[in-house]
Amino acid sequence: MSRVAALLAVLAWALAGDAAEGLDRLPAVLHLHSDLSTGDFSLEQLAAMAEKQGIGALLLTENYLLRIEYGLPPFRALTRVVREERSVLDGGIDRYLARVAEVRATNPRVLIVPGVEVLPHYYWSGSPLALHTTVYNTQKNLLIFGVQDAAALRSLPVTGNPVGGYGWASVLDALPCVLVIPGAHLLTRKRRSLRKVGRVVVVVNRRRWLAGALLSGVGLLAVARAWPFTVDPYPPYSDLGLTPHQDLIDYVDRLGGATVWSFPEARDEGEQWFGPVRVAWHTSPYPDDLLRTARYTAFGAIYEDTTHVERPGGSWDRLLGQFASGERSRPAWGVGESGFHGFTAGKELGTVRTVFLVGERSERAVLDALKRGRMYAVQRQREAELVLTEFTVRAGTATAMSGETLRAGEATTLEVTVAVEATGGATSDVRVTLVRNGAVVGAWTGPSPIRTVHREIFDGAPAFYRLDVRGPGRLLSNPIFVRRS
């Protein structure tokens, strides 16, 4: 084929892929932090860096409440020790949203979508009195987007956020406060005593300053530490399983927002000594929790770590199969998750991206694409990037794209069209793998661009198709479902 013919073929292919859907690709970085919480850069700096790299959107996930505490029973509020880092709940939700709006106005070329990274629950084992204690699940987090109401965002039901009611724990926290009463009595009332000075007996009236100040100080400290005496919705002193996480997912769902399981296969552990007391922390990978929870929107499927959940026949395919067969009310979409705080450990802003397919460049369109599965995840390799120019399933005149369900009659011929190219001057081969219901049904290897059509007869059973592409980097599509009409 001549060079001109090749160029025309590529152009026709690209136009066919885009025009058929009427959607534009919006490269985005999902999960990053600014200096409003634990990031190194300001929003203005992040927007400038994104624009320089051709990134069209930033889905912020500032830390919601980064606070870990431990208190000895029964008076946990009075004795608690707190480790806290900067978060938007402490700095003010309204201030956070106002800052995002301000930067969006000054640099409209980069769309900034405000979100938060939330730790729903952690719990302790052991005791400082035994000189060893461990805190679990401090990195078992959810990312939340699309909650527009500041008051609702302030009231997320998570450990450490005083939004609960009152109970016996409130009584125990308030009990030391009554020490203010005897303390004030000792400070205000003088104790009368007789003292012999030579041959003279003198009446002495003295206040008990030390005892009164000590009791009053403890009582006032108890008030300051326990206020407003509400019960923690999920106390951190026992393992509550996935209940706090599912409750948060449902809370956000009722508000019309989106939740994303963050880094489901990442591991976090370590220890630190405080004098003779050893304090350890541990978060195990939790890919199976994707199957144990429901109604969340997505999960981190590609990030800068080794993952297994998205491999053919893994947890993601089992979850998608449950949705396809009607056992689950919603699927879970895969996204590319960055986790960018700064240039530490060789991390870059745009290495991992989520490419949204949107009809307009707006926050509403991005959130709609996130909820519908109209996106794919990609991990770049240096300057090279894989681009999904077409992925559709056709039955007759009906066509579906990522996130959609195609209705087809039994014995209908299904045509799965795949088109992938590599940008950035990459010359290595690309391998495209087509997964159907958790099993590999097609694989093609060759130089970019690759375009192929897989055909098979629909047997009437619910099915889903998705892509896993390797080459200069990696690309992971979201599924297309097929059901009998």
Image: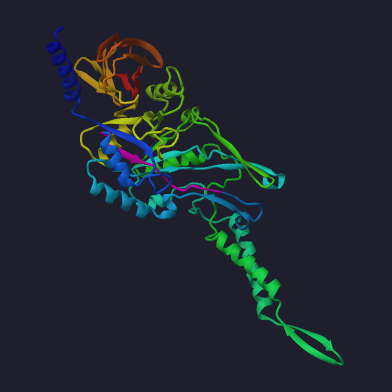
The quarter holding residue 127 reads: top right
Question: In this view, which residue lies farthest toward the right?
Answer: 199
Point out the image quarter for the N terminus.
Answer: top left
Front one among 246 and 131: 131
Q: In the image, is residue 158 above or below residue 213?
A: above
The answer to whether residue 67 is magenta is yes
In the image, what residue occupies the spot 33% across and 20% down?
A: 472
Q: In the image, is residue 313 above or below residue 223?
A: above
Horizontal side, residue 335 vs residue 204: left or right? left
The quarter holding residue 277 reads: top right
In the image, what residue occupies the spot 39% across and 32% down?
A: 337
Query: Residue 432: horizontal and vertical position, in percent?
Result: 33, 14
**Callout count:** 0
| Residues rendered magenta in the picture | 54-68
Front one among 367 and 242: 367
* Residue 265 seen in this snapshot: yes
Query: Residue 72: horizontal and vertical position, in percent?
Result: 65, 52
Q: In the image, is residue 55 above or below residue 91?
A: above
Horizontal side, residue 467 vs residue 452: left or right? right
* Residue 413 seen in this snapshot: no
Question: In this view, which residue lies farthest toward the bottom?
Answer: 200
Point out the image quarter for the C terminus.
Answer: top left
Query: Residue 220: horizontal and vertical position, in percent?
Result: 59, 67
The answer to whether residue 281 is magenta is no
Horizontal side, residue 344 vs residue 107: left or right? right
Question: In this view, which residue lies farthest toward the top?
Answer: 1
* Colouring: rainbow
Query: Residue 414: horizontal and vertical position, in percent?
Result: 27, 12
In the image, what residue occupies the spot 32% across and 10% down?
A: 445
The quarter holding residue 475 reads: top left
